[in-house]
Each structure stands twice: as structure tokens, then as C-alpha cells.
Image (tube, rainbow, N blue to C red):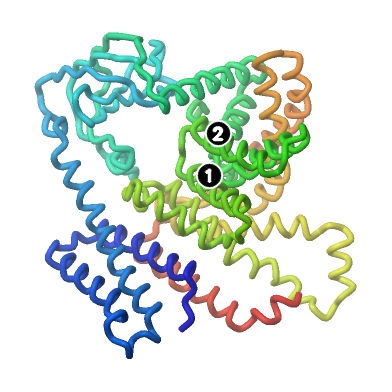
Amino acid sequence: MNITSSKGLCWILISFIVGVAVESLYKIPQVIVVVFLIAGFLISFTPFFLKELLKRKKLLIVLGFSILFFCLAVLRYQVIQSQIENDPILKFNDSKEKIELTGRIIAEPDVRNNYQNLKIKAKGTNSIVLALVDRHKKYSYLDEVKITGNLETPTSKGDFNYKNYLMKDGVYSVMAFPEIELVSKDHKYNAFSFLYDKILFFKSKMKESIGSNYSPPGSFIIEGIILGNDKNMNQELKDKFNSAGLSHVTAVSGSNIVIMTSIIMSILLFIGLWRQQALYFTFVFVWTYVVLVGLPASAVRAAIMASLFLLSRMLGKQNTSSRTVIIAAAVMVFQNPFVLFYDIGFQLSFLASMALIYLKPIIDYAPYYFIKKRKDLIKLIVKFKIKNLLDILSTTLAAQIFTLPIIIYNFKSISLVSLITNLLILPLITILTFLGFWSVVLGIFSRFLGWVFYLPCQFLLMYFLKVLDAFYQPWARLNINISLLFCFTYYIFLVFFIWLVNKKSKPEFLDY
């Protein structure tokens, strides 16, 4: 069996992800982990001592290190679980006595319609408390505050597991509407916090620009597309997005990152920078933008992939998409093992990426397979650029097939019109992102310059809203329940189908 270095690395990283998944579902006794560790070491180093195994050296090394990384994942998860159990503030949860805490706000205040969420790191500890406070009081990142109230364990809200959702962010305690006092606005910066504070300042200016140039509901859509923030949307507009299957449009994803990266690269090359210089500046821009939009899992995944791609371009190396996705997944899971099961955005983002790599080519090939003897039809497809339309359709269909069970399992419903609405909307998102970004940024400095880009945006937004209204129908969304077992079975059959099609059709596929 021929195993290349990159393929071996992928198997090792996959074993790490599997280790986190197994430990999440079933707590593995430490004695078993020790046995696996010993086995991993023996398998990895045995070929260097037994000459008859030298021919299988690569295979055994990959197998051994896969076992070692599986154990590393289990230990990583267990260490974090231990840290949670020993959290100094957790023991005060659900106590009838009020607790007084002093700490700093460690993230951008999350302002909602009726309240705002503040993530407060308690002084002298690593514990983070989520405080729900009045939205009209203004607080900033790194403000020092004192809160007094009852600590509570986050509870599930209907089908939504709020406890797990917060746990992935390191939050294990909630304090609802405490007495709050601003202690100090004296911000103590390090290099990262200083840069983050300046990025948040620029983001606030962008929000002001959106508010001054756009009116609701258009302002909500622009804020969602540019900044990934849909928290200010009213429930009716959210229901329209859900009904039309377009909620992903207002979540910063790989497509947003690609569009924004293309914009900045074009500008840097236009003003005369060398390609190498443009790549360095684009690298900085990608991560600045991800911080700007709040570090959602989909954007972080896209940023890691973009960074690896830019690095490979700098070094003159080839880049393989599927392996890049796996590396990005492993990095994120190592940094925070809870994202694997508790972050739906992470799951949808990676499944959509794998869909574009493995399923989209099969769907793209299907029309050519059925009309392969009709060269006149193929020429017609090319001539009238129907291929572009088919590309949008195959992208949407592939992503929906891969993410369908996760969406149904978590949201208990599915949009029946999402294929149509995505075909009607997605071609405009690139234009709307480009024009919207410049209308917002230029609007910070000059309202007139903002309006130059605002006017075409307004026409696109009017069309967007017409599509939402047209498909906001009772029949457009179907309520359905599925089990976790069904999800696993679905993906086993899907993987088998892709493997079977590639095995039987690959030579012909390459010639179409």
C-alpha cells in the first residue's frame, strides 16, 4: 500500500478527530488509553528494529502515530473536562445566595433587541460568566465591572441545548440581570487586546455607517452579509429566511471569505504591489476580517483554509482541498474539542466544504453523462452559459445533500423551496457583498461616497426582499424529526455512494 507523507498526515489527523468524537460519546477509561499508548509506540518503532518489517515501515508508522494521536485526543478532552469540574465558580451555580464578582469584559458586548450579553472573566481566575444586562447601558471590551446576583447553570431551551452551546465558548455559569457597576474603563492592553479593541472600534463605525445609509429590513440583510450579524433581525424576517432556506446568507462562511479575499487581492495588485507582497497583506486581512465578524466557526475554518492556501502559494507548493479541510478541522478541534459536537456552524461548514470537494463533481458530471452522445447539446450549454447556472445548482444541491440530516436533526424542519431560492439569490450575493462592503466602508468617511455604492445595493435588496416575501408560505417548510442513528446511517450510505460512483466512473468522468 503506497502511503504518501501528506496522505499519512491526513490519516493521523483524522484519528485525532475520531478520538475526540469517541470520548465525547463514551468516556474511555484511562487504563485503556495507557494500553493504546504503549501499542502505538510499539507499532511506530518496531520497523526500525525488525528488518523484515522495513518494507511496511510507512504503513506501520502511520498506524502507530494514528493510535498515538487518538490517545492524545482522548487525553485532551479529559483534561478540559477536568478543568470544567474544578472551575472555582461552578460550585456556586444554582445557589440561593447572591454572589459578587469583579472582572473584565473579554469580548464584544452582544447587543440583542431587549438585552445584551457580557462575557466577564472573573478577577484572579480563568472562569467566564455570561451576564444578561440592560441593552441601553453602554459597556465596552475590557471594561472592569462588578456584578451581584445568582449564578445559574445554563439550561436547555426547548430542543436547543443552551448549556452545550455555551460550554464550547468556555462559559459554564450565567447571571441573569444582576446588579452591575462599572468599576473602571482603564483598559490594560497587550498586543492582541490592543489590536482587537481597534478592530471592534472599526466594526462599530461600520455598524453606524449601515444604520445611517440603510433602513430596516435592508440594513439587517447588509449587516448579516458583511458582518455575519443577524441578531437584530425581528422574528418575522428570520422566519422568512428560514422558510426560504437562505439563513446561511447572513452567516459569514467560506464564500464570504473568498469574496473579500478576492477584493483585497485585486486592489493590492491594482495599486502596484508584487504578488508576494499582496499575499502577505491578504493573509493579515483574512484574519482581521474573521476577528471583525466575531470568529464564527465557519469563518475560522475558511480563514485556516485560506491561510494554508496562501502559504502554499508563497512556498510554491501544491494544495489539496480535502487535506486542507482536514487540517483546518484538526486544528480547530485541538484548540476546542467541544466544537465537534456542540457547534452546529462548525459541522455545517465542514460538511458543506466536503460536499463541494466530493459530491459537486459527481452532480456536475451527471448532465454530460446523460447527453454525452449529443455534442450539439453540450455546445449549446457552453454557448448560452447554462454551465454557470448548473454550477450554482450543483453547489447548492451538493451542500444541501451533505448538510440535510444535521439541519433536520437540530432544527426539526426543512425548507422545500431552498433550491429555487438559492438559484434566485446566490448569483447576486457576490455583487451585493462587494457593493455593500464599499458602501459601508466609504460611508464611514463620506455619506456621498457611500451612496454611490448604496444605490445599486438598494435595488438588489428590493429584489432580495421580494423573493423572501414570495416564498414565505405555510407549505414552504416541513416539520420533521429524525434520530442520531438515522444521521449516521445516512452518511454511511452517502460515503459509500460517492466511493462507488468514483470507482466506476472516474476514467469517463475525467474525459467529459
The spot of residue 88 in percent (x, y) is 14, 32
Q: Quadrant of residue 152?
A: top left
- Please name the amino acid that badge 1 sits on: Ala
Q: Which residue is mark 1?
A: 303
- Please name the amino acid that badge 2 sits on: Tyr
- Residue at image position (61%, 46%) is 255
Position of the C terminus by quadrant = bottom right
Q: Rate crowding at label 2 as few (under 14), some (14 to 19) or many (20 or more) other CA atoms within 10 Å.
A: many
- Residue at image position (44%, 22%) is 194
SS state under label 1: helix
The spot of residue 311 in percent (x, y) is 57, 50
Q: Which residue is mark 2?
A: 289
Residue furthest bottom in the image = 52
Q: Rate crowding at label 1 as few (under 14), some (14 to 19) or many (20 or more) other CA atoms within 10 Å.
A: many
Task: Give 178 or 24, whichever is nearer the viewer.
Answer: 24
Residue 472 shows in this picture: no
Task: Give 189 or 358, whichever is nearer the viewer.
Answer: 189
The spot of residue 379 in percent (x, y) is 88, 68
Q: Quadrant of residue 141?
A: top left
Q: CA distance from mark 2 to mark 1?
A: 9 Å
Residue 71 shows in this picture: yes
Evaluate if marks 2 and 1 touch, with contact meaning CB atoms under 8 Å apart: yes
The spot of residue 410 in percent (x, y) is 40, 50
Drawn side of residue 256 relative to residue 294, left or right: right
Residue 299 position (above or below residue 360): above
- Residue at image position (54%, 55%) is 352
Drawn side of residue 228 relative to residue 420, left or right: left
Residue 189: mark in rendering: none
Indicate which disc, 2 or 1, sits on the residue closer to the N terminus. Answer: 2
